[in-house]
Image (tube, rainbow, N blue to C red):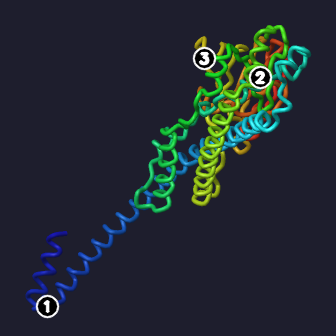
Amino acid sequence: MINFFRKIRKKLANENKFQKYFRYAFGEVALIMIGIFMALQLNNWNENRKQEAQFKVTLEQLYSAMTYDALKFEEHIDITVNQIESMDFFLNNPDSIPTVGNYLTNNKNDHIKRIPYFLDWMAADYSSTINSDTKHIVGNLNYNANNKSQNEIFKYALNYTNDFNNEYEFFKDYLYSLYLEYNVAMPETTIYNDNSLIGNLDSLSYPKNVIFNIVKLINSTEFRTALKYTKNDRIRYKIFMSNRLSNAKSILQLIKNYYPEVKVLYQDVGIIGTSLDGFDDVGGKSTPMILTDIENDIWKIDVYLKEGAVKFRCRDSWAQNWGNNDFPIGIGVLDGENIVVNEAGNYHIIFKPITGEYKFIKLED
C-alpha cells in the first residue's frame, strides 16, 4: 500500500501535479477521519443504549420502592388524623369524661374500661415503622451526568433519600410520663389496617384501683396539658408526612414521564412463618416462590405447611411484606397481620403482589 502511494506521488511529482496530489491526500485523510468519527459515534450510541437500559432496570426498582413508601406515608397520615380526632374528643367534650364520683357509683361502665386503650392509642409513636429500600436503590442508580432527564431524576431521588436521615424528632413522651406518674400501665393494643383499635376489654385485666387512677388521671389538669402538647406534636408529624408524600408522588411522576412503561416491580418474592421454618427470631428464611406470569406479576409455590402463620415478603426482607387475617383466600396488605394457617397439609399457593391477592389451595394428600 505504501509503495502504491509512493508511485502516485512520484508520478504526480514528475508531472508537476502537486496540487492534485495534495487534494487527493487531503480527501483520503478526511475519509479516514470521518470513518473514525462515525465509529466513535456508533460506539457512544451503543454505550448510551446499554447505560439507558440498565438505568431503566434500576429505575423500575426505584419506582416500586417509592410506591411502597407513598402507601406507608398515606397510612401514617390516616393514623395520625385518627389520633388527633381522639385527642380532640377528650379536649372538646369534658362532660363526656367519667368523673371519680361517676366511677364510684357505676364502675361497670364499658366506656370506662375502654379508656386505657384509647390513652395508649393516642400516645403511640409510629414514626419509626417505615422500612424503605429506596436509599439502597438510589445508590445503585447509574445515571448519565450528561443526560438532563436522568440527572434530574437522580438529584431529586437523592434529596428524597437524604430526608430519611432526618427522622421525625418531635415526639415526646408527654402522655407516657404522666401515665407512670399516676401509676397506670398501658395495655397492648393492635391497630388494624382500617385504623380501628382492638384490645382486651376484660375488666379483670384492670383492677378497680388501677381504673380509679385512670379516672383521676383523665380529670387532671396535667392530662389536658399533656394532651394539648401531644396533639400539637401529631399535627406537626402529619405536616411532615404530608410533605414526604408530596415529594414521593412528584418523583414518581417524574419517573413516569421519563419512562412511561414503568410499572411496580416485585423481585424475589417468598413466604415465611411458623408454618414453615419460623420467622426471623428463630433464624427462619423466606421460601422462594416462582414467578409464573411476568406480565401480571403472579407468583406460585407448592409447599407443605404446618398449622401456624405465614406472610409474603420480597428479597428476604421486611421492607416489603404482605399479610391479612383471612385464610385461605384474601387480599394481603402491606405490613398486615400474619396469615393464620389453621390446617396442616400440602398447598398450592398463588400470590399477586400488585393487588395483594392470595390463595391457598389444599392439595390431595
User: Which numbered disc, 3 or 2, marks the residue that appears first in the sequence?
Assistant: 2
Look at mark 1 in the image and give the residue it sits on. Answer: 17
Residue found at the very far left of the displayed protein: 14
Q: Crowding near pointer 2: few (<14 within 10 Å), some, many (20+)?
A: some
SS for callout 3 = helix
Q: Is residue 128 left or right of residue 135?
A: right
Q: Please tell me which residue is depicted at 54% across the width and 41% down the height of the picture.
A: 134
**Of 228 and 300, the residue lying toward us:** 228
Name the quarter where the N terminus is drawn.
bottom left
Point out the tag, 3 or 1, that comes first from the N-terminus.
1
- Closest to the camera, between mark 3 and mark 1, is 3
Distance from the alpha carbon under mark 3 to that under mark 1: 87 Å
Q: Residue at 65% of width from left, 34% of height from top?
A: 230
- Viewport quadrant of the C terminus: top right
Residue 280 numbered tag: 3
Residue 304 appears in the rendering: no
Cα gap from disc 3 to disc 2, whole angstroms: 29 Å
Image mark for residue 265: none
Q: Position of residue 337 (x, y in %)?
A: 75, 25
Q: How many other residues sit within 10 Å of disc 3, few (<14), some (14-19) or many (≥20)?
A: some
Indicate the amino acid at tag 2: Tyr
Residue that extends furthest to the bottom in the rendered view of this protein = 16
Helix, strand or loop for disc 1: loop
Mark whose residue sits in front, 3 or 2 = 2
Horizontal and vertical percent position of residue 210: 76, 11
